[in-house]
Image (cartoon, rainbow, N blue to C red):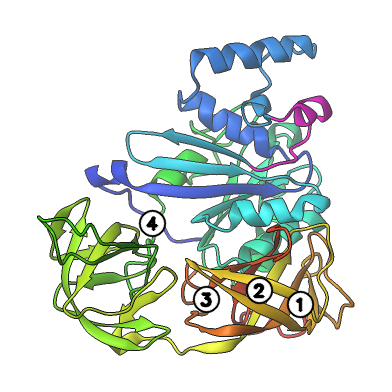
Amino acid sequence: MRTTTEQTAEGPAGATTLLRFATAGSVDDGKSTLVGRLLYDSKSVLADQLEAVEQASRNRGRDTPDLALLTDGLRAEREQGITIDVAHRYFATARRRFVLADSPGHEQYTRNMVTGTSTADLAVVLVDARKGVVEQTRRHVAIAALLRVPHVVLAVNKMDLAGYEEAVFARIAVELTAYATELGVPEITAIPISALAGDNVVEPSANMDWYGGPTVLEHLESVPVSRDLSGDARLPVQYVIRPQTAEHPDYRGYAGQIAAGSFHVGESVTVLPSGQVTTIAAIDALGVPVPSASAPESVTVLFDDALDVARGDLVVPTAGAPELTRRVEATVCHLHERPLVVGAHVLLKHTTRTVKAVVKDLPYRIDTGHGLARRPRPDSLTANDLATIVLHTSEPLAMDGYAHSRRTGSFLLIDPADGATLAAGMAGAAFTDGCEGGL
């Protein structure tokens, strides 16, 4: 069963594309084993890494390598047999490069799953075929919907322990697909797998001839990747370059990574928050002049006019400039053990700009265990809570809605006293149509 349209493989240039994906799911659904199987079967494990895993597996009384140990790197993870922190791994095939984040399954590590999935192009949500959909599975699908992850894979794992029965897979796939669709997940693909045995992970399974869709790796290699090339362009200024040498006495460039869209020489742009309007005179990429540049390239732009531009300013097309605001309504995931309350003074870091802010309101907490149900007026936010928040900032911000741009619609809240990261935020409405009041 496939719940999305067929995707075509990319051409030779696909080998240079990068896909960021994350795993999620309930405890013991096999996330780390799936990641280990992907690395092992795609021959992305170094000999010394495999030797260390084999030795650790023998020490634990296993006859075969425990592939989960390829990602569970913390000592506590290995001892307890669970994933605690987000483990990032990098590998490549002939068709694409990958950055994967293996996220914890326990509810108390929800914040880790949020951070691991926040930059993902795709989320793989695992379900134990024997247990079916559980509350934590629903929670992780809801978080993927909140984070606007464009592609979700429903990997029904441990099919070997369910007799490779098509009916078992179909029941789980239909239930979770309907739930994800209600929450507004744009694209869903269901794949029956056995991470332990390797069925439909890298190679097609001989035990499930009733399934005609892609393996997990085939889907990862072919799913389209958006790099925010369309829409309004955004360039947060990270550094002002003024060499002031005899060779370049008047050089004044503004360096940063393009967060969205494209910029062109001769284009009219506005610098925010000052509102100064100018024209791009030149664009340098790695010291070489280019006629245009797109996200996520790092570039230096030069203007026709000598403007007062500093780190934290945002360069945007004059025709598509966002409105400035000091009132920020957003969805946040609270990351710190220290509670967040109304009246708290924080620092808000948006792209390269950091401003003072105060928490004005906490309208409701989001119960991701029950759809996206709203629980009004929490007294405070504690670690792993997701909630809506209203902030007032000391200076105006040029912030897009998170639904419009995941890069320029996100921010961090920081404790001004000790620099601790308190919460991660997503500006604008977090709910799709039909989710008002929860599902």
Which three-letter amino acid code belongs to the residue tagged 1?
Answer: Leu
Of label 1 and label 2, which has the lower sequence position?
Answer: 2
Residue that numbered label 1 is attached to: 439
Which three-letter amino acid code belongs to the residue tagged 2?
Answer: Glu
Label for residue 217? none
Which three-letter amino acid code belongs to the residue tagged 3?
Answer: Ala
Instruction: Determine the image quadrant of residue 94.
Output: top left
Residue that numbered label 2 is attached to: 182
Residue 6 relative to residue 129: left or right: left
Of label 1 and label 3, which has the lower sequence position?
Answer: 3
Label for residue 403? 3
Q: Which of marks 2 and 3 is in front?
A: 3
Provide residue 429's location: percent of width, then percent of height: 62, 82
| Viewer-closest of 76 and 284 | 284
Label for residue 224? 4
**Highlighted range, magenta:** 74-86
Of label 4 and label 3, which has the lower sequence position?
Answer: 4
Q: Which of marks 2 and 4 is in front?
A: 4
Residue drawn at x 81%, y 53% as measured from the top left: 107
